[in-house]
Amino acid sequence: MRSLLEREWLSRYPYERHVAEVGNMIQEAINEETKSTAATVIRRVAIVGGTHGNELTGVYLIKKFEQFPTLLHRSSFEAIPLLANPAAVAMNQRYVDRDLNRCFAREDLSNPALATYEDKRAKEIAAQLGPREQPKVNVIIDLHSTTSNMGLSLLPSSKAPFNLRLAAYLSRLHPEVRVCCGEQCDQDAPLLRSLTPLGCTLEVGAIAQGALDAHYFQQTEQLIRAILDYIDANNKGQPPSAPRTLTTYQAIASVDYPRNAAGELDAMIHPQLQHRDYEPLFPGAPLFLTFTGETLPYPGETTVFPVFINEAAYYEKGIAMVLTEKQEITIPDGA
């Protein structure tokens, strides 16, 4: 029995045309058709927690999902929980040797000389979920918490239409969700989520390091459930309706604290800016406060929207905040 697609092609070409030529053209059309449909079909999803060992929201959600796997069950795909950094979790520390979420750059994963605990763990995770060119999972959801007042934030792995549609759906379902795109919002980033083009980081807070917050625990679990339900409906050809436009906060730069010649802090976040993530920062507005009481204003010429303000884990990275631009984007059609 010939498929409908084969019959259509054969009707367009005389029978005497070389069979191989027609066969090749049929196969190309089938390949294109398969590519266009399979691109949005998700077969395997990884829910990752404990990438940072002292961010307990993700740690204990993964433990819960391991104990009650039916919570992740959906009929059209497999969802697997993964505790990313068990040694750091056991120590209730962000990491053992270095930040695991900065160990997934292509060149680092292929460098055998990098042999810290986190480098080895990154290679194991990349082998389990990756490689980037042909990942073993279609979607990665990486669970994080922050000491900054980020509320419910979604950081997409890329600007693939699937990710943007999912973000728009979640933003409509939970209006408090904000979408923040990193400077490296692609698969060249050294982040765990970059192992696949589809997926996101869920970043919630403010939550102290090494502590749980029941409110954010429940809200994170609700978002995970909504994401899985969305994927399941999408797989079945019934994607939930979502807005065609999306408000995003595009990272454009990071700002360090003022420091002295020895590299020590000279100032702190100004009290008028503290806890005001995603709010506009106008030129000349208070930015830092020195230890002698002097206000240092924002020197920029355009309004920006700072995020990750005063994140405790970023002191060592030289980041006082990340500046973003607020953008309204139209979600393109496509996979």
Image (cartoon, rainbow, N blue to C red):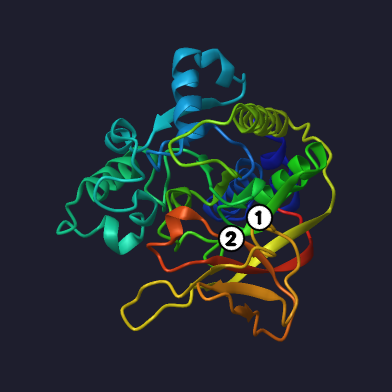
- Which residue shows up at 77% across the image and 47% down it? 168
Q: Is residue 258 above or below residue 14?
A: below
Mark 1 in CB contact with mark 2 (< 8 angstroms): yes
Q: Percent from the top left, x then y, of residue 50?
A: 41, 36
Q: Where residue 296 sits in the image (x, y, percent)? A: 61, 80
Identify which residue, 81 or 204, lies in the foreground: 204
The one nearer the camera, 113 or 86, is 86
Where's residue 254, x and y in %? 53, 71
Which residue shows up at 52% across the image and 61% down it?
Answer: 186
Q: Secondary structure at mark 2?
A: loop
Residue 331 seen in the figure: no
Q: Which residue is mark 2?
A: 309
> Where is 324 relative to 191, above or below?
below
Query: Is label 1 in a helix, a strand or a loop?
Result: loop
What whole-number distance in Å separates the C-alpha atoms at marks 1 and 2? 7 Å
Based on the displayed image, in which of its 4 quarters is residue 266 positioned?
A: bottom left
User: Dot 2, how many residues are within 10 Å of its Cα: few (below 14), some (14-19), or many (20+)?
Assistant: many
Q: Earlier in the sequence, mark 1 or mark 2?
A: 1
Residue at numbered disc 1 = 275
Residue 280 found in image quarter:
bottom right
Name the amino acid type tagged 1. Answer: His
